[in-house]
Amino acid sequence: MESAFSSADLSAIWLAFKLAAVVTVILLLVGTPIAWWLARTRSFWKGPVGAVVALPIVLPPTVIGFYLLVAMGPNGPLGQLTQALGIGLLPFTFAGLVVGSVFYSLPFVVQPLQNAFEAIPERALETAATLRASALDTFFSVALPLARPGLLTASVLGFAHTVGEFGVVLMIGGNIPDKTRVVSVQIYDHVEAMEYAAAHWLSAGMVAFAFVVLLLLYTFNPSGQRK
Amino acid sequence: MLIFVCLLVAGQAAHAGEKITIAAAADLKFALDEIVVLFGKAHPADRVETIYGSSGKFQTQIRQGAPFDLYFSADIAYPRALKEEGLAASEVQSYAVGRIVLWSASRDTAKMTLADLADPSIHKIAIANPKHAPYGKRAEEALKAAGVWEKVEARLVYGENVAQAVQFVQTGNAQAGIVALSLALSPELAKQGSYALIPDKLHQPLEQGFIVTKRATDNPLALAFAQFMTDKEARAVMARYGFGLPGEAK
């Protein structure tokens, strides 16, 4: 039997994982302060900001893909900005996929973190304050360790959701090997070209990957499931 | 509630006509829409629904029992395969020969040739995916025949079908594209850009074919539409969108 995966398949798998890794790191950096603020604030803006963060859960990927394609184009606000900065245009580039995926996976990182932060008892933070810990110190020494299960859930969901992304990538990626042709798009191409065997291998691989990831998460991080 | 039911029943009665669904290649978007309107004048009680997409995808979907009554492919090989598998209720009818053009929204392409694509200031060039889209295959053949494939390959971006390739150029994200003449001639695109016809010596012909699918075997409306495609009116629309017509060149 031939090797199950062609080199193009392997490259598409590698690209999807690379994208997911980069996006997860960025989302943890960006999402943590947002989640912390959402968990702690009593501001009027909590509702609106929370709703904006959750938008990608409800919106079809085509909406995000369409607006990004237009916004990142030469006449769009993002496109004008990136051109002025000398970066060029983002559609059809790996960086463009990163930008799109950060939007698309944002709620999957922010919401578990927010839940974890909300579950931290007020007393733990107050105790730290009476011991004269600074706000920043309290956050890193008390809040983050207590929110560890949420941090793990957020990382895994952010990563897995980005690996599973399709619609946004199809609309802004341009299907370029080694740059924007991730595994979900590669499967689509196999199906369109009626290469069902190749599509089966990749699809079954994705099912196994998704199952193992979620199984590990639910087995080793039961507290992350708590309501 | 009673009124609601009455309205429903009345609605049903008012819509006594037949309905057919056509799956058609993306390059037909504008031409077939016009033909459907013409056909509708002769069949006011009936409804014709059109769905546009990639020929390869529709072929797969029809194999899996998709509810399409007619299938217009941009590559006649696809409906031929379905016919061989016993999934067609008609002969495979050749209805048009497509042409490809170099199209741009930001440059005057009227005097450009494929060789000009070597210009590195054209950062991205959009074509349909040659792996499964007929227009993409022909674009690749033409670029190779013109001897510029090596120079442009790294700058190519691939649309899922030829309409998405157009959209990449339309939004300015690609500076040029190789797309269907029928789309470049549409009123929408004609005012947004310019095109140069690519000599058809550079690629295999884009012979396009359609079938009535097996599920529409006894559907008179589907057969009537198939018949209408050979009508003078329908052919005139196809010709206006730049398609070569069967039996015309011979």
Image (spheres, grey):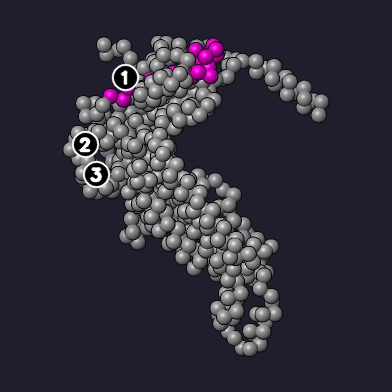
For residue B144, which numbered disc appears in the image?
Answer: 2
| Local secondary structure at mark 2 | helix
| Local secondary structure at mark 1 | loop
Q: Residues within 10 Å of mark 1 (few under 14, many from 20)?
A: many
Residue corresponding to mark 3 = B152
Q: Quadrant of the C terminus of chain B?
A: top left
Amino acid type shown at disc 1: Gly
**Is B217 a magenta residue?**
yes
Residue corresponding to mark 1 = B244
In this picture, which residue range is highlighted in magenta? B205-223
**Is A78 a magenta residue?**
no
> Outermost residue, front direction?
A1
Residue at 39 percent of width and 15 percent of height: B93
Q: Residues within 10 Å of mark 3 (few under 14, many from 20)?
A: many
Say which chain tag 3 marks.
B
Image location of residue A221, percent across then percent down: 60, 65
Image location of residue B31, percent across then percent down: 42, 23
